[in-house]
Amino acid sequence: ENENYPYADMVKECLVQGKIVPVELSLGLLRTAMDEKAAEEGSYGSRIFLVDGFPRNYDNVQGWMEHMPTYTSVLGALVYNCPMEILEQRILSRAETSGRSDDNLTSARRRFDTFRRETEPVVRALEMAQAMQSTENEGNGSQILIVNIDGTGSIEEVWDTTENAMNSYIKNDILTANSNLLKAIEDGDIKAFNKLCADNLSIEIIKGDIRERYNSISARDLFEKHETKMTSNVASISNASIQILDGVKAIVSYENGGSRERREWHHGPKGWKCVSLSKEKLP
């Protein structure tokens, strides 16, 4: 609760009454918080934000569609499922130290009623959107991923499940970048290829006992001298795996035709960039 925020009193009143904060205010607060974090110095590149309790109703969805698509993109939603009785117990326990004006059963039950009436239909709609996108993509996944999480466990148990879910979003993000890179090679699109690569990369080509190494090669040279000579067909990719190293580095490996390719990706200010390629001919 920021007392200096111009609409602090209105937000507090909404919380006490169990009402939903107007979307213009909630999105304004959200963008301010995201801008502040994005401006911080660090090595994490473009950030992935976990927005708590949003969208709460169809008005939130409409507001997001009107104001946010050019600002950020949606990876999915985490849905925590927990019986009302346990939630009430937790709120009463939190009220002992939180000092929040809405930490009481009357306000909580109002919020629960609002959730059932306005938020649950939005969750069902998001799940339907995921199913429809997956069907349209012929079973190859959806642009958004809805993950249902059991909220009745301990803090550690719920966090472990949440962490796994967040890792799945990161994996999907990296695999999408890798797929787009292969598509650029397949299409001969040097412009799209450059956008997905670091300025200088390393490459290793392995053919039996022969190894060719290039420790610093430009994306253009890699594309013209090596990638276009390889068979890169997105449809022929098989046995793919991904290893996330520390949240901002990852390795994607897969079989492509008669070879095993291994690409290392780093996350920076402009998203995921390929920094190295290892290609080994299979026996």
Image (spheres, helix red, strand yellow):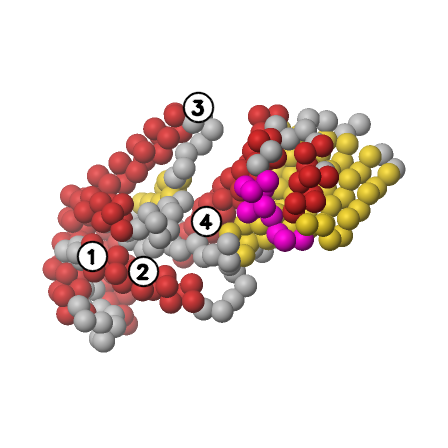
Tag 1: residue type? Glu
Q: Nearer the viewer, residue 29 or 50?
A: 29
| Mark 4–mark 3 distance (CA, rounded to whole Å) | 24 Å
Q: Earlier in the sequence, mark 2 or mark 4?
A: 2
Specify the label residue 166 is tagged with: 4
- Residue occupied by mark 2: 31
Crowding at dot 3, Cα within 10 Å, few <14 / some 14-19 / many 20+, comes out as few
Vertical placement of 38 versus 227: above or below?
below
Q: Amino acid at mark 3?
A: Glu
Residue drawn at (43%, 54%) of the image: 48
Q: Which residue is mark 1?
A: 24
Q: Quadrant of the N terminus?
A: bottom left
Q: Nearer the viewer, residue 177 or 223?
A: 223
Q: Residue furthest bottom?
A: 4
Q: What crowding class fits label 1: few (fewer than 14 Cα within 10 Å), some (14-19), or many (20 or more)?
A: some
> Which class describes the residues within 10 Å of circle 4: few (<14), some (14-19), or many (20+)?
some
The residue range painted magenta reads: 190-200
- Residue 138's disc number: 3
Measuring 45% from the left and 68% from the top, which residue is drawn there? 40
**Residues at marks 3 and 1, CA–CA distance in whole angstroms:** 37 Å
Q: Earlier in the sequence, mark 4 or mark 1?
A: 1
Chain-order first, disc 3 or disc 1: 1
**Residue shown at 67% from the left, 53% from the top:** 200
- 18 in relation to 214, above or below: below
142 vs 197, left or right, is: left
